[in-house]
């Protein structure tokens, strides 16, 4: 008599896969939000939960729109995560293209690729930054823009601009608290 093995297939693997997908999507969104805050230099102290949720949602929509228009995959989110790392230089040109697209859609650059300085200050104040922080950020962005203004490739220029701003944000200790950002995003997912 040969032993028989009963195989039971439960619906749990599908549930586990769905939960894993949701967590993975939540992580991607959290990383995106984290990088966007880093690029736009919003000071954590000046944020309130409602502001964080509002800004996160609007920036993610713009990022997704740009990534779709440019036909980039979800792998672009890893580039945004890497961009935040202070000493990480190997971020792809594609991340710069998404940032350039976002900057145009948010009216931070004009169609000629020139930085609209007043729009940068207005943008961060509209989303909760105080006047002093907005002025300091505007000065930082203007200095960084001057450093990269001779570059002809829009994507690479905006990528280098973002890296310069990242350095400035680290110098003034404005980097957002990752745990706060991730908690807020995962609470919404």
Image: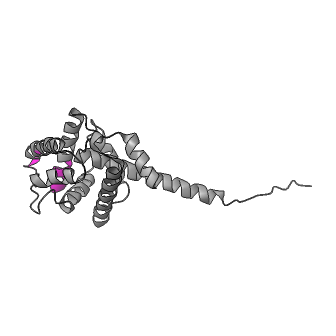
Magenta span includes 72: no
Query: Where is residue 11 shown, x and y percent of the image?
Result: 66, 61
The single residue placed furthest to the bottom in the displayed view is: 69
Image point 17% across, 46% down: which residue? 161
Magenta span includes 152: yes
Image point 35% across, 53% down: which residue? 53
Along the line of sight, the residue nearer the viewer: 38 or 6: 38
Q: How many marks?
A: 0
Which quarter of the figure is the N terminus placed in? Answer: bottom right
Instruction: Answer left or right for 28 relative to 174.
Output: right
Image point 57% across, 56% down: which residue? 17
Query: Bounds of the magenta span?
Result: 148-159
Instruction: Answer left or right for 149 relative to 180.
Output: left
Along the line of sight, the residue nearer the viewer: 76 or 60: 60
Residue 6 visible, this angle: yes
Instruction: Answer left or right for 151 relative to 98.
Output: left
Query: Where is residue 110 shown, x and y percent of the image?
Result: 11, 60
């Amino acid at each position: 008599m040969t032993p028989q093995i009963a195989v039971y297939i439960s619906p749990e693997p599908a549930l586990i896969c769905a939960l894993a997908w949701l967590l993975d999507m939540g992580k991607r969104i959290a990383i995106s939000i984290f990088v966007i805050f880093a690029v736009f230099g919003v000071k954590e102290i000046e944020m309130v939960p409602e502001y964080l949720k509002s800004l996160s949602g609007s920036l993610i929509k713009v990022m997704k729109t740009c990534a779709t228009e440019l036909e980039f995959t979800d792998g672009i989110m890893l580039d945004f995560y890497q961009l935040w790392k202070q000493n990480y230089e190997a971020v792809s040109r594609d991340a710069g293209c998404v940032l350039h697209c976002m900057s145009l859609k948010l009216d931070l650059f004009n169609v000629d690729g020139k930085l609209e300085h007043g729009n940068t200050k207005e943008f961060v104040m509209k989303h909760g930054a105080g006047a002093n922080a907005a002025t300091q950020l505007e000065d930082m962005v203007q200095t960084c823009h001057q450093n990269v203004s001779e570059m002809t490739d829009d994507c690479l220029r905006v990528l280098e601009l973002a890296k310069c701003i990242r350095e400035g944000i680290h110098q003034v200790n404005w980097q957002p608290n990752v745990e706060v950002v991730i908690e807020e995003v995962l609470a919404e997912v």
